Image: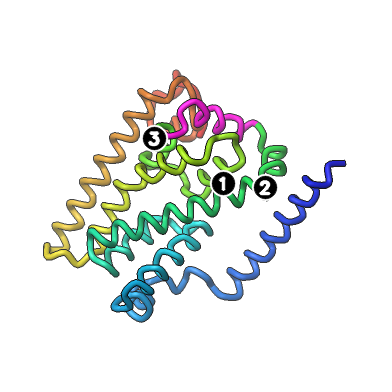
Amino acid sequence: MNWQRVLRGLLLMASLVAISYFLEATRFGAGLNQAWIDAEVRGHGISGELLFIGMGALTTALAMPRQVVSFLGGYAFGFPAGTLLALLGTLAGCVLSFFYARWFGRHLVSHRFGTRIQRIDNFLAGHPFSMALLIRLLPVGNNLATNLAAGVTNVRSTPFFFGSLLGFVPQTVVFALVGSGVNVDSTVRISIGAALFVASSAIGVWLYRKQRHGHSLGAEVDAELDPDAGSHDHDR
């Protein structure tokens, strides 16, 4: 018996129980809103910025949509600084969930979901930077699921993180702009944000169709991105 795998499996289950209890007991993430930003972050200088990055990392690592963090970054710090701090928080959350999966869940998850993990591994392996960038640009998918799935594959972490960081930029810019108090009419800000979102999504879809090197993220994704996906390879 491989006692190291058994220990990792036990640690994984114990950590999941602890996380579930913590989330239920504290309603973690529910308080990450504009009122909390006003009370704890705005006007607190470096400590407020570090607190925001830390909370952004923890909440995105625990499945909060990164768009919420980006919106609150814009609300708290304005457009340029809010974009940067939200990016740092989102990237830190990506690193946390990636290494959580790699250190604790790799063998267990790979054994149970081997086919899907292998497909993601194949998608990322040859070009981890460009493929991670491509995944983040797509208008479909789940940030946490991508982080965890990548963590249990053999993908190299550094290019995956850098590709993810660059891919996070368009939507972070969009939601930080919408959440910011820039001196532009709110309707104009939202319209600009919507246009940027559509443009970045269209680029992501185009790249997925043209640059995926014969691999696929799944039949569901292919169907969403291409109505004629029946003639393409499948999966997400």
Label 3 close to label 2 by CB (< 8 Å)? no
Q: How is the image coloured?
A: rainbow
Span of residues in magenta: 115-129
Q: Which residue is mark 2?
A: 105
**Which of the 4 image quarters holds residue 53?**
bottom left
Q: Which residue is mark 3?
A: 134
Give the distance between the C-alpha atoms of the residues marked 1 and 2, in whole angstroms.
Answer: 9 Å
**Place of residue 61 in the rendered image (x, y in percent of width and height, measured from the top left):** 51, 57
- Residue reaching furthest right? 1
**Place of residue 181 in the rendered image (x, y in percent of width and height, measured from the top left):** 19, 67
Magenta stretch encompasses residue 149: no
Could you tell me which residue is drawn at 39 percent across and 37 percent down? 133
**Image mark for residue 1:** none
Residue 219 in view in this figure: no
**Which of the 4 image quarters holds residue 18?**
bottom right
Give the distance between the C-alpha atoms of the residues marked 1 and 3, in whole angstroms.
Answer: 17 Å
Amino acid bearing label 1: Leu
**Image mark for residue 148:** 1
Q: Earlier in the sequence, mark 1 or mark 3?
A: 3
Position above or below: 24 against 232: below
**Place of residue 108 in the rendered image (x, y in percent of width and height, measured from the top left):** 72, 44
Helix, strand or loop at mark 3: helix
Q: In front here: 73 or 63? A: 73
**Place of residue 36 in the rendered image (x, y in percent of width and height, measured from the top left):** 38, 77
